[in-house]
Image (spheres, coloured by chain):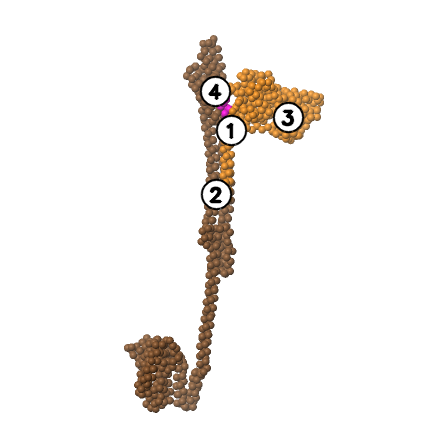
Chain colours: A orange, B brown
Amino acid sequence: MKKGRFVLLIALLLAGTVFLTAFSEATTGDDEISDVKYNFTYISGTYNDDYWAVIAKGAVDADQTFLTNTRCIAITQLTSETKAEQIRKAVYSKSDGVIISGNGKTEDFYQTIQDTISADVPVVLVDTDIADSGRNCYIGTDNYEAGKMAGEDMIAATGGKGIIAVIVSSNDLQSERGRLAGFRAAVSAYPQMEIRTVLEGSKNVQESKEMLFDALNKYPDITGLFCGESVSSAYAGEALASEQYRNIKIVAFDLTKDTLQFIRNGRYYSVIAQDPYQIGYEAVKYLSEYQNGEKNLPDVIYTKTYHIDQNNVDKYPLNQSEGVVWNVY
Amino acid sequence: MERILSNKSHITRNKLLHYFKTLLGITAVLVLFSFAMNLVGIWQFNRTANDISTMNGFFEEVMDTGQLMEHYVQLYEESDYENLEQNITDLNSQAEYFSNTIQVGNSKRIFRDISHMLSAVKNNMKSTKTLISEKSTFETEVVWVKAYESQYEKAEEGIGYIQSEKSVLNVQLLGQMSVIRERLRLNLIISAAVTALVLIFSGFYAYWNAKSLAEEITEPIEKLTQEAERIQTGNLMEMKVHTVYPTDNNELSQLAEAFYLMLLRIQNQFTELQKMDRMKEELQQSELENLKVNNLLKNMELKALQHQINPHFLFNTLNMISYTAYLEDAEKTQTLISTVAAFLRYSLDYSDRTALLSQELEALENYVSLQEQRFGDRIKFHFDLDCRIDRMKIPSLILQPLVENAVVHGIGSYTENGYIVIQTVWNQKQKTAVLRVSDNGVGIENDKLLELRNKMKEIQEKAFEEEATRHIGLANVYLRLLLFTGGKADLQIDSTVGKNTTITLTIPCSDENLAESEAVNDNNIDR
């Protein structure tokens, strides 16, 4: 008799657990904040890139702290125009603040930022700054310092002498230019080191690769490569894995699954990691404080950069970006 | 036994029932939960689908509003504006409602944004209307048109922004639907897996139960069958009780118990029977011994008598003498001795038996001829016989004593003219045989006759109480006759003193008796 009841109880528990799991999953939605103080808009280029997604994650996490709501928008057709449109839409829907990368060169984009500010909607630029756009704040990596850190790593990797190639983003961007400047500054102290070529990396992986190999063919004596942007950082470890390029020391940028893998297998000497999570978090924090009417807020907030190599790779787990609800346009 | 049965019965049945209840319970719970899970999933799925259609209606209305706006700026009709305003108000309340009811992704935020954008559109259209109505204040129409169109374009832009949210919301709702669908699928898999698991489990459970139950049932049955076979073929008494005994208290154990109880009873009865048999045997043995002793005693008695005088020896001797006499030509002696031998033979052979009347008479003739030799002319014997009763059956030696009495007591003292008549008559009417011996002797004195008659009467009364052997002579004859006929014979004594004496024996004798006696005679012919 007791055995039968026991079996029945187990069956009930099992079924109940399954049922409750299904039920609780069904009611899962956004982590709603019941009393939202401010509504911000984060406009990202893409949502499946670790870097931008982690910024979003930082912002969404900050929402919980500052009782705000940040809408994360991803644009499939990423141009200055579409970005500007999203900014205008944010203003139109009475957003309390816009977080966007200053990765746009057009007049329209400049104008939109200025219009936004004049509509009393604060703009925080992340990752890339446009200092003269009138933005309220830049939050991101000190690219000059990051470039300098990379340069020092390159010096350490090559022993202070060698022919270096540098890949920077195709855009004539302040951030990449800062990195390059920092890198140059570090390397210039070593007369035996020469930056032979500076390549403008493409967003297209295939194009970028072709360009790289062209350069390597053209300058076969290259012994160091600094990938100053994310695209080449993601593929260089694999593209230059063969014995032919084994002597080329690589310093890459941003901590991603790919770069982490190449650090682990020893192909990359080091990776200069930014802190996208902190960028997102700081952006929401800034906007929240701004809307609270706090005075004397800084117009530039540099987040930390990290030097990651085989020795300390395990101390820096990848930032997770799960739990962010994206609105894709 | 009855008590045990009432306590233990239905245990196997209860086990079976309990097993089925458990299985049924598990299955019911599974089915219910699986049903509930799917119901919830389907409900959610339907709700989301419903949300999508409601939202599509909402966005259609947004589109209508956009067209109304366009219509209005083309024709400036007041009614259009009023409808427009009404529409936007309506949409706004709908958005408000959706922000609370639809909860997918960041739908609440999106509806919040839509709501604000609707308000902005409304404001822009209000400005447009104001500018349109202030046409007169503008210098040229172109300036006027440009002025209100800039406001209208903002509103149009807003409508565009709102429209763009449709796809985002749809993506989220469809995403939700696919999540639900996935969950339903998962539910299905989980419930299938759980069901399979439970089925497997219950299969094992059933197998285990059935096996143990079957073993519980069949094992004792097999053993009982073996035991039964052993009883059939082997020695019942050597069977040990409770060599098979199910440990569980169920029907089978009761059966086994009943079986052994039966065995025990049979064994007890068997033992009892054996004991009785033995006792009977002993009893028979003792009876047999008793009988033997009796026989022995009788034989010994006989032997003792025989030892006194061996009649056969005597008879043989007489025969031998008779033969010698013949050899010596002593014809008369030979006849005498032969007669004596014949009589002796008859008295020896039939002394304790019945004989035919003819045999009796034959013996009597031998005796008479001896007496004739002895007494010569002193006594004459006369036979008056009724040959119809020759084959009648009578106790032997009943006439001889009468004749002897007549010779000794009646005529013994006569020197001449002694006359003895031996008469047999069959009274066909009365179915009686009358045997009569008369003499013309001295007769019996009245006192003596009375005494004799009293004695005879006494004998007749007490015939079956006393032993015949205790009497001799007349009394003996009468007694034997009484015993032979079952008390129906009669002995009559008639005597006149100095004149005659007649002894009459009346014996019942029917026709059948005669016939019967014939058959008996055949068997005894050579004795």
Report x, y in % for residue A33. 52, 26
Residue B491 location (% of width, % of height): 33, 80
Give the CA separation, mark 3 to mark 1.
35 Å
Q: Label 2, on which residue?
A: B22
Q: Is residue A124 above or below residue B44?
A: above
Q: Which mark is residue B118?
A: 4
Q: Quadrant of residue B516?
A: bottom left
Distance CA(mark 4)–CA(mark 1): 25 Å
Name the disc covering residue A29, or none: 1
Kindly identify the residue that appears in the image at 69 percent across and 21 percent down.
A188
Dot 1 falls on a residue whose secondary structure is loop
Q: Are marks 4 and 3 on the same chain?
A: no
Q: Secondary structure at mark 4?
A: helix
Measured as percent of width and height from the top left, residue A225 is found at 66, 25
Q: Report the amino acid beneath label 2.
A: Thr
- The three-letter code of the residue at mark 4 reads Leu
What residue is at 50 percent from the left and 48 percent from the top? B211
> Which numbered disc, 4 or 2, marks the residue closer to the eye?
2
**Part of the protein shown in magenta:** B106-118
Chain designation of label 1: A
Q: Secondary structure at mark 3?
A: strand
State the image quarter where residue B311 is shown: bottom left
Badge 3 is on which residue?
A306
Q: Main secondary structure of the magenta part?
A: helix
Identity, as a three-letter code, of the amino acid under mark 1: Gly
- Most extreme residue toward the right is A191
